[in-house]
Image: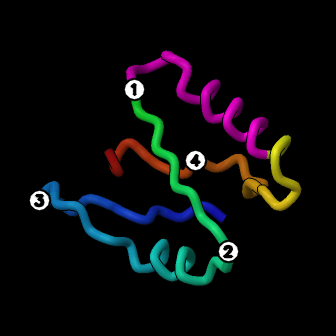
């Protein structure tokens, strides 16, 4: 499941998204939040894929949500 943890209001101020906070609170065990930002077509998806492969190879308990939907939108930036 992908939900935003932080969104920005019309004034440009960051706000905690209650749905995202509830989803994070429901997780039992260790959590790592990774943020990758950069210019268009500069390898952000590549580095995320490589990190996912690395984590899967090192831990049988590492999982990623099975979804094709975007976790963020241009409105969140």
Identify the residue shown where x is 21% and y is 63%. Answer: 9
Q: Earlier in the sequence, mark 4 or mark 1?
A: 1
Q: Secondary structure at mark 2?
A: loop
Figure quadrant of residue 6: bottom left
Query: Residue 31's spot in the image, x, y percent?
Result: 60, 64
Q: Secondary structure at mark 3?
A: loop
Figure quadrant of residue 32: bottom right
Query: Residue 39's spot in the image, x, y percent?
Result: 39, 21
Residue ID for mark 2: 29
Tell me, yes or no, whether the two marked residues, 3 and 1, touch with CB atoms within 8 Å.
no
The segment highlighted magenta reads 38-55
In the rendered view, tell whether residue 39 sits above or below residue 20: above
Along the line of sight, which residue is nearer the eye, 55 or 74? 55
Residue ID for mark 4: 70
Q: Secondary structure at mark 4?
A: loop
Which corner quadrant holds the N terminus?
bottom right
């Amino acid at each position: 499941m992908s939900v935003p943890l932080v969104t920005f209001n019309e004034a440009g101020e960051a706000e905690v998204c209650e749905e995202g906070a509830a989803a994070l609170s429901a997780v039992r065990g260790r959590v790592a939040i990774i943020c990758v930002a950069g210019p268009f077509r500069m390898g952000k998806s590549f580095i995320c894929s490589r990190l996912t492969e690395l984590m899967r190879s090192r831990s049988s308990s590492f999982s990623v949500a099975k979804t094709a939907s975007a976790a963020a939108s241009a409105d969140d930036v």
